[in-house]
Amino acid sequence: MEEENIVNTNSQPEIAKKKIEKLIYVGKSRNNILETIIAEQNIVVITRLLNEYNITDIFREDLRAINNVDYLVLDLSAFVNSSSNEEILKNLDKLRGNFEFKIIIIASGFRRGNELLAQCFYMGIYNLVTASTDSQMYDQLKICFSERGMTYAQASQFRLDILSQKSSSTSIIKTEYQKIKQDVSIGVLSVTRHIGATTWAINLLNFFNEIPNVKACLIEANKHRDIETLADVTEINKMGVEHFPLAKEVRIGGMELFYDISKIGDITAQKYDFYIYDFGETEELTDTELASFLNKDIKFIVLGSCLWEYKYISNTFDKLRLSDEQDRLYFIYNFVKKEDQKNIRSQMGNFNVYFNEYQPDPFELKSKSYLEEILRRYLSQSYFEEESKNKNRFNLKKLLKGRK
């Protein structure tokens, strides 16, 4: 056990008047980012325990007097090898019910869809830190140590009720995607401005975000910095919004969006399964950037069918030297009437052409069916198996199958 006080002796009146906050930290090893925030906020460390522990034993033997602290920071790396999820949750529930302090859970690298974090959320623990880089760790911990802490909306990304929208007449037995390939790069390019490329990129991210065991991010690979404008919003469509200024990241309902391509080293270090690059429009890209787009594993070009847009389409074909022999290149048309779609398909020859559903809201998932088709070489799907809640209901298909 290590005990240490880190109190800034600054004698400024405003600091002197501030209530001295106290903290207990349990982790496998020292968290340098946490230590930085402790020092910045003049928090007193009452106890610091650094090792692997059984969570029941440590609260019975080492942490019996924890009444007078303001924060209890628990790094799950100290417990996961020696305590079951049930044991961890049981102790957290006791702490939550019997004490007033703020509980902060550090689960570095844990992914959305983790059952343990979901259960923490359901019991009302919202300060859940999953950062895997120093900049993300700092930004997330700063939110946790703020007066408000992480909100319900911000923590709701850890919920596991994605299937709740399924019909109440059936019970879900199984649904799952499995990754076939990791580290997949996806490029999104528009033939001109304001035609929906960023909306399509967010839609792709939303698609991946619905899959618990898949980790994806969006990178704004252009100079627009449109994503950064979302930083001051607190909620979108009932999804919490978090801004991590050091990482140049905005997180919306668990969707991770980066607005500074210069941070690409830090981003790729987090080992996402899918990286979505929003390149912006053709005209503003250099030859090097255009080549980068063509080198992506999957390439989406977003376009429209208005007469004045054809010059931009022609410009894109010329600059990229496009041919229908290029692998994994897909054209996504926006704002096309159904009766015009057949003619456009004919004009596009052997290119892969899809028509996006009407999407006024970038954060409402659309066109899911053909996204599953396009991405099937990267994701294998175990389809829904459904069982009628009325088990006595007559089923002709099942009866005929039994007679074979």
Image (cartoon, grey):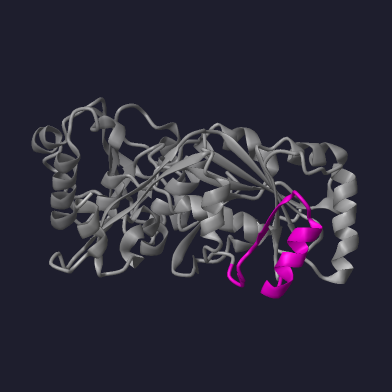
Looking at the image, residue 305 sits to the left or right of residue 23; the answer is right
The stretch of residues the image draws in magenta is: 336-361
Looking at the image, residue 297 sits to the left or right of residue 92; the answer is right
Residue 123 locus on image (x, y percent): 22, 57
Residue at point 83% right, 51% down?
A: 282
Q: Quadrant of the N terminus?
A: top left
Nearer the observer, 260 or 114:
114
Q: Residue furthest front?
A: 404
Q: Quadrant of residue 59?
A: top left
Nearer the observer, 337 or 392:
392
Q: Within the magenta stretch, is there residue 299?
A: no
Residue 185 locus on image (x, y percent): 62, 38
Residue at point 46% right, 58% down?
A: 253
Q: Is residue 141 above or below residue 362?
A: above
Q: Residue furthest left?
A: 60
Nearer the observer, 97 or 175:
175
- The tally of labels here is 0
Q: Is residue 17 above or below residue 233?
A: above
Q: Within the magenta stretch, is there residue 357?
A: yes
Residue 323 locus on image (x, y percent): 82, 43
Q: Can I make out residue 145 in this image?
A: no
Q: Quadrant of residue 166?
A: bottom left
Residue 235 locus on image (x, y percent): 48, 67
Q: Is residue 345 above or below residue 107?
A: below
Residue at point 58% right, 60% down?
A: 231
Residue at point 18% right, 66% down?
A: 389
Q: Can I make out residue 46 in this image?
A: yes
